[in-house]
Image (cartoon, rainbow, N blue to C red):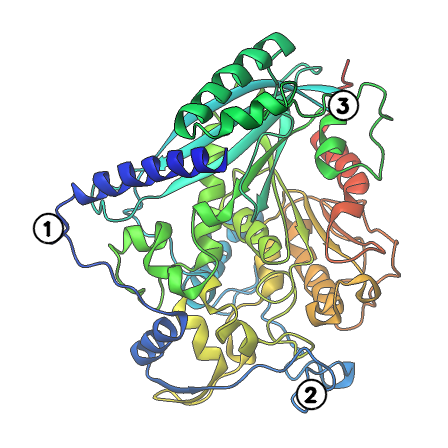
Amino acid sequence: MQKYLILMLSMFLTKGVAQQASIDSSKYPPLKTLTAIQDQANMMQQLGIKKLRPGPSGNESDPNHANYDESQADPCPQLPDVLTTKNGKKVTTPEQWWKVRRPEIIDDFEREMYGRVPKNVPKVTWITKVTDNEFVGRIPVVAKQLIGQVDNSEYPLINVNINMVLVLPQNVKGPIPVLIMFGFLPPALPAPAQPSLADMEKINTAFKEMMIKQNPELKAIFDRYPAYDPITRLPGPNFFAPAPNADSSPTEQLLAAGWGYCTLETSSIQADNGAGLTRGIIGLVNKGQPRKPDDWGALRAWAWGASRALDYLETEPQVNAKQVGIEGVSRYGKAALVTMAFDQRFGMVLIGSSGKGGVTLQRRVFGEAVENLAGSGGYHWMAGNYLKYATDESSFGRKTGCDLPIDSHELLALCAPRPTFVSYGIPEKGDARWLDQAGSYKATVAAGPVFKLLGVRDLSVNNEYNAEKMPPVLTGLLNGELAWRQHNGGHTDAPNFSYFIPWANELLKYNRTPK
């Protein structure tokens, strides 16, 4: 069996190589191959940076360990005023926000932190690879495996195919909300429908014949074990399983509430490393060349991919395209927030344990620092210009996070007035202090005035972000479109799904009981 699979894989790879060889590469700029260190050095040279500061260590026993002393966490406690324009005018009306202040903030974030999406990004054509009727637990669903083929006619040396799986419940009448979930595992159908026993017998008979033809020695083995079938059925749906509850997987909770979900493979859009910046969608648009300082990083690329997924969902009759949300944890929590901030079509967001580059304040020096992101660990998530804020020696001097013209409270404000849920766990269970939960709470408080300006509710606390104290664990602030809850689990948002779903249902005015 193994030899047969290896043979089939070899044939597939040979076919792919033959197709690649048919491209006349001399017609296109040579594809650059750089290590992450080389790519970062290239960006530093473009920016005139001679030396970056090293980020603090997450190991508290190291001499250069991160700061966890609140008295030293805010070297520049005054945040940029989210409702004051660059020329010093106060924003007092929604019109001023939409026409003046919001575009100013977007421009700063694009230039200094996340990069700009190029105007010439090629189109995506969605192809349904598989449509399958399945059961997730006791819930009947239709599952679709989809591929978003990116037009690479301008630079055929790079292929980008976005992998996505859409799962919709069949026991609820549409249109329904859908939550797009960022992930790092290749999307797969949750519970593939399987052939009948009679069909399985035919498959095994044909498969044995092929294997024996490939390797005649296998006949003697099959003769010794005549009842053995190489291919067996997977466990079927468990109709006696308990109904989904707060301990069930987030996807089961969504389906039980009459929602659909969509898993999106980020690595099929853009690799999660600096060496991949001349590949993926960023490399395709740049024709295999290194980035310029304000080019987009991986976070913005993943967000672009989520927007293309929403393009597809707008064509699905079963989906309410105005009630499509975006979710992610850790680096994908950062990406979820960036997605929501820049694409106003998204209806809601669940931001899990996002830390620096996500919800927590850039100016804070508590746990992870700007220097950690700008260093080799996460610089590829950001625009090249972000490196400036970890600079020790350069043609423009020294800069820190305090020099950024924007901060994360303004990124949250770009989500207003749409439902925005910030989720964290606790350090004792693995949601490390490194993520700076307190700094994230400050940012959420500071974003509140924009939500209120646009006629919706914020956390319903005083907006004095330097005075407000983070509420106790398991104390959710869930009465407005801006929400906060710290659960008692680890580096995950799963424990908050049983709160997120009813919170979102109330705001979306959605109440469909599955049959």
Q: Residues within 10 Å of mark 3 (few under 14, many from 20)?
A: few
Q: Between disc 3 and disc 2, whose residue precedes?
A: 2
Residue at (70% x, 72% y) in the render:
434
- Counting from the top left corner in percent of width and height, residue 183 is at 58, 46
Tell me which numbered mark, 3 or 1, is placed earlier along the sequence: 1
Question: Mark 3 and 1 residues: CB-CB less than 8 Å, in contact?
Answer: no
Residue 27: image tag: 1
Q: Tell me if residue 127 comes above or below residue 502 in the rendering.
A: above
Residue 339 in the image: above or below residue 134:
below
Image quadrant holding the C terminus, namely top right
Residue at image location 56% in from the left, 75% down from the top: 372
- Mark 2, residue position: 62
Side (left or right) of 70 relative to 259: right
246 to the left or right of 34: right
Q: Secondary structure at mark 2?
A: loop
Q: How far apart, in angstroms, are the residues tagged by discs 1 and 2? A: 52 Å
Q: Which residue was labeled with disc 3?
A: 511
At 48% from the left edge and 58% from the top edge, which residue is drawn? Answer: 272
Kind of element beneath mark 1: helix
